[in-house]
Amino acid sequence: MIANSYTDEIVLKQLREAFEKEGSVHLTQFLDKKVHEKLLAQVKRAYFKRTFAPLTHSYGVLPFHQNLLARTVHDFICSLLGLTLPLPSISAYSFGHRDYTVLQDDVFEKKGILVQLDLSLHWKEEFGGSTYLIDKDHDFLRVLPLSNSLVMMKTDQTMKRFVKYVNHMATNRRRLFLEWFYPLEKKELSDLREL
């Protein structure tokens, strides 16, 4: 299911070190091609519940049911981190033309690890839809939509997140991604620092 290049122990160790040092890793061509195509077809057929509040957000969301793929990705994340974590809930998101989330002064991230598996096909940067994670020093991490890529990011209570407005150039294309969030307790965070 996961590309063989990411299952090697030496590669996992290098990814763990990079994640600990940088606070994020971006893995391209994450799933085998056939698995990615099957998952993309499944998510594209799904009915996304629209959620809209003009001052804060507009997008589609649905719970993603636990299956073999969800368990496999979860096991990979635990292996990469060197931790045993409970399997979190997973949501699928759809952002099309006129969708966005707004950076809010009073909404912060939780302490943990945010994981996004992008499924967007033929997406271009000029369409918008990138995810931005901003810390207290106004440094930011921009996650560009790239199909079949997995991004893991450390988050804490000083960070904020938003998805840039998807403009008219996207036409009928949608940014699709699955999202896991692993809340980390103090013990797990100290275990993670020891990696």
Image (cartoon, rainbow, N blue to C red):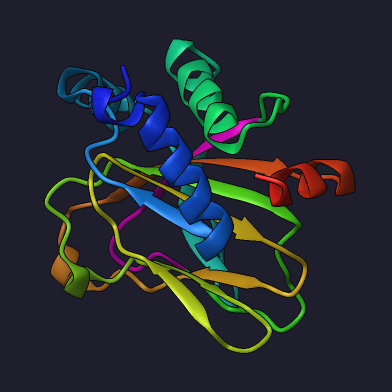
Task: Please state if 168 lies on the left or on the right of 110 as rendered.
Answer: left
Q: Position of residue 114 (x, y in %)?
A: 58, 50
Residue 49 seen: no
Looking at the image, which residue is at 50% across and 78% down? 140
The residue at 36%/24% (across/down) is 7
Say whether residue 26 is left or right of residue 91.
left
Q: Quadrant of the N terminus?
A: top left
Give the residue drawn at x 36%, y 66%.
Answer: 130
Q: Residue 154 colored magenta? A: no
Task: Kindly give the residue lying farthest to the right in the view shown.
Answer: 186
Q: Nearer the viewer, residue 106 or 139?
A: 139
140 or 64: which is nearer to us?
140
Whether residue 7 is situated above or below residue 176 in the rendered picture: above
Q: Position of residue 166 (x, y in %)?
A: 31, 69
Q: Position of residue 134 (x, y in %)?
A: 57, 77
Of all residues, the one furthest to the bottom in this rendering is: 137
The residue at the far top in this view is 68
Residue numbers of the magenta segment:
89-100
In the rendered image of this protein, does residue 173 appear above or below residue 35? below
**Quadrant hosting residue 43:** top left
Q: Is 96 inside the magenta-drawn segment?
A: yes
Q: Is residue 134 left or right of residue 117?
A: right
Residue 187 sits in quarter: top right
Q: Residue 33, relative to residue 111: is it above or below?
A: above
Which quarter of the rendering shows the C terminus?
A: top right
Tell how many labels: 0
Does any portion of residue 126 appear in the rendered image?
yes
At x 77%, y 68%, the residue is: 157
Q: Position of residue 27 (x, y in %)?
A: 33, 45
